[in-house]
Image (cartoon, rainbow, N blue to C red):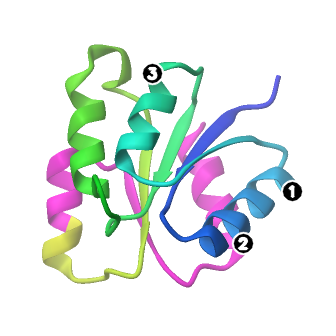
Amino acid sequence: MPKTIMTVDDSPSVRQMVVFTLRQGGYEVIEAVDGCDGLSKLRGASCDMVITDLNMPVMDGISLIREVRNDPAYRTLPIVMLTTESQEVRKQEGKAAGATGWIVKPFKPEQLLAVVRRVLV
């Protein structure tokens, strides 16, 4: 059975690229438009990993990670940030919230798949 990955990003074009890349890699994908949407969809689904943007309306990626980590059922769920932010302070903030990894946009499809494979071992 293929692994399921949730992508959370307010940009339709970024979501489309991530979805296309992940499906080409053999993964099932759940799409969410912001942190709140992602949180509600996560609670109703079986998910193996989350890939989230940092800067989004309603609920940003850091807040999403904190909320997910507060739920004992998702403490070990891999969460990777996919964002244009590359400052070390932002990466540390993500790590402190519970992010598993960090990818800077724009990304190469093979780079995304390599990170996914490494995290989902």
At 42% across and 45% down in the image, what residue appears? 79
Q: Based on the displayed image, in which of its 4 quarters is residue 57 positioned?
A: bottom left
Identify the residue under disc 1.
24
Which is more toward the observer, 12 or 109? 12
101 displayed left or right of 27: left
Could you tell me residue 110's position as x and y percent? 73, 70
At 28% across and 44% down in the image, what residue appears? 65
Characterize the local packing of mark 3: few (<14), some (14-19) or many (20 or more) Cα atoms within 10 angstroms. few
Kindly check if marks 1 and 2 are in contact, taking CB atoms under 8 A apart as contact: yes
**Is residue 58 depicted above or below 42 in this figure?**
below
Q: Secondary structure at mark 1?
A: helix
Q: Secondary structure at mark 2?
A: helix
Magenta segment range?
A: 92-121
Under mark 2, the amino acid is: Pro
Characterize the local packing of mark 1: few (<14), some (14-19) or many (20 or more) Cα atoms within 10 angstroms. few
Q: Which mark is residue 43?
A: 3
At 40% across and 82% down in the image, what residue appears? 84
Alpha carbon separation for disc pair 1 and 2: 9 Å
Under mark 1, the amino acid is: Gln
